[in-house]
Structures are given as C-alpha cells and as structure tokens.
Amino acid sequence: MNKIFNGLMVFLVIAFLNGCSIGKDSDKISSTYQGMTAEQLFQSGEVSLAKRDYSTAAKQFEALEAQYPFGKYAEQAQLDIIYAYLKSDQQASAVAAADRFIHLYPRSKFVDYAY
C-alpha cells in the first residue's frame, strides 16, 4: 500500500510541475529550440553546463526531452536536468526530476545518482 501511495505522490508532483510549465514559458522554450536536432540540443546543453549556465542548460535539456523523449540522449538529458537544477539551487525541481528519472529508468545503471 505504501508503494502505491508513494507512486501516486510522485505522479502528482510531476503532474503539478508539468501543469506549472504550461503557458507562455513552455511555448517560448519550444519555439526557441524548434528545428534543432537531438544532438544539437544535447551539445548546447553540455556547453551551457560547462559554462555553469545552469538555467539555460536545464531549458535546453528540457527542450531535448520534450522534442525527442525516446531518443538516444533522453536518459542522459534527464540526469543533466537533475544536476542543473541542483546547481541552480532549485531543490524541489531537482527532486521532481529525480523522481521522474527513477520512474522512467528504474533499471538504469545511473539510477543511484537519481536516488
């Protein structure tokens, strides 16, 4: 019963955060990165991380995940989103992103990072 409750809570947090992102900001992010390939989005996100521009990196990885959710960079982008949120002191967003990663990739060799 506790697992069901925890799963429901994770789902509700993710749904809430997704609901918060709907609107002008998500449209702006989508249009900003529209037409970029998954590799281009991933590389630009990695460059932003290297420059310590964590908010831009998070947006780039989120755009990658939104446009190419099952692509070859999706799993690493999810991990990088967690990292970018942590480095930009957005703990609640980092926890939600980590919970999402755990839910999407429970057998990943990197799942311990999300925990």
Image (cartoon, grey):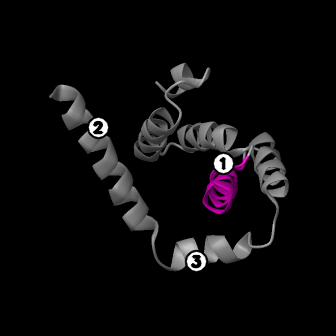
* Closer-to-camera residue (87/96): 96
Q: Residue furthest left?
A: 1
Using the image, tell me which numbered label, if any, was put on residue 27.
Answer: 3
Disc 3 is placed on an element classified as: helix
Provide the residue designation for mark 2.
7
Q: Which residues are magenta?
A: 53-71
Residue 86 on image: x %, y %:
54, 38
- Name the kind of residue labelled 2 in the image: Gly
Residue at 73%, 44% in the rendered image: 73
Q: Is residue 56 magenta?
A: yes
Task: Judge from the rendering whether residue 41 lies leftward or rightward of residue 114; answer left or right.
Answer: right
What amino acid is at disc 1? Tyr
State how far apart marks 1 and 2 are (Cα). Answer: 29 Å
Mark 1, residue position? 54
Instruction: Kindly state the secondary structure of the residue where label 1 is placed.
Output: helix
Residue positioned 29% across, 37% down in the render = 7
**Residue that appears at 79% across and 44% down:** 46
Q: Is residue 61 magenta?
A: yes
- Residue 33, percent from left and from top: 74, 69
Q: Quadrant of residue 2?
A: top left
Quick check: 20 above or below 46? below
Whole-percent x, y for residue 23 in the image:
47, 78
Q: Quadrant of the N terminus?
A: top left
